[in-house]
Amino acid sequence: MLTHVTVVPPEGDWYEVTASVPDVFVSQQHKPRDKKLYEYYYVPETIECFTGFTLLVVERELRPGPGMFLARREVNGKQQLCSFQISYKGLDQASTRQPDMQTIGRMRIMDYWELDLRR
C-alpha cells in the first residue's frame, strides 16, 4: 500500500516520504477501520525508544483502554518520538505517560521494515 510515512531520524527534522507499507486492511483478521485514522512512522536508526528499521502503524482515534501509545515531546528544541503504556490494575488505570508528552495515538503494529529513503 502506498501512503505517506513520517521519517524520524536520530538527528535533524522529521520529514515525510511516500512509501510502500504493509496493507493491514487486506488481512482477514484486521477489524476494518477507516484508513484515514492511521498514520505511519519510520525509525531508520536507533533512537531512545525504538530500534532502527522500525515501522510504526498508529491509530489516531483515541479510544479508552490499555495499550502502547506513540507520543512526541520537545527536548532542547527538537521533536523526539517516544512511547508510553496504559494498563489496568484492578479497576485503576496506570500510565507511564510523562506530562510533557503529546499523544499521537495508539500503536497498532510495530515491525522491522526497511524503506527506500532516497528523496
Image: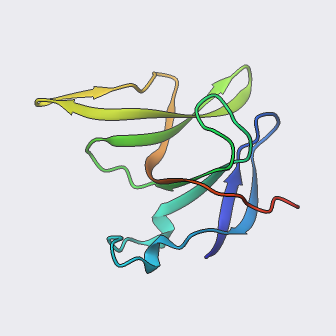
Query: Residue 69's quadrant in the figure?
Result: top left
Residue 96, image x, y percentages: 39, 25
Residue at the image position 11 percent from the left and 29 percent from the top = 90
Residue 89, image x, y percentages: 17, 28
- Relative to 92, say whether 32 is above or below: below
Q: How is the image coloured?
A: rainbow
Residue at the image position 51 percent from the left and 29 percent from the top = 101
- Relative to 89, say whether 43 is above or below: below
> Where's the N terminus, which quadrant?
bottom right
- Relative to 2, say whether 69 is above or below: above
Q: Is residue 43 left or right of residue 23?
A: right
Residue at the image position 73 percent from the left and 60 percent from the top = 115
Who is closer to the viewer here, 24 or 32?
Answer: 24
Residue at the image position 82 percent from the left and 58 percent from the top = 117
Residue furthest front in the image: 112
Query: Residue 30's quadrant in the figure?
Result: bottom left
Q: Is residue 37 left or right of residue 22?
A: left
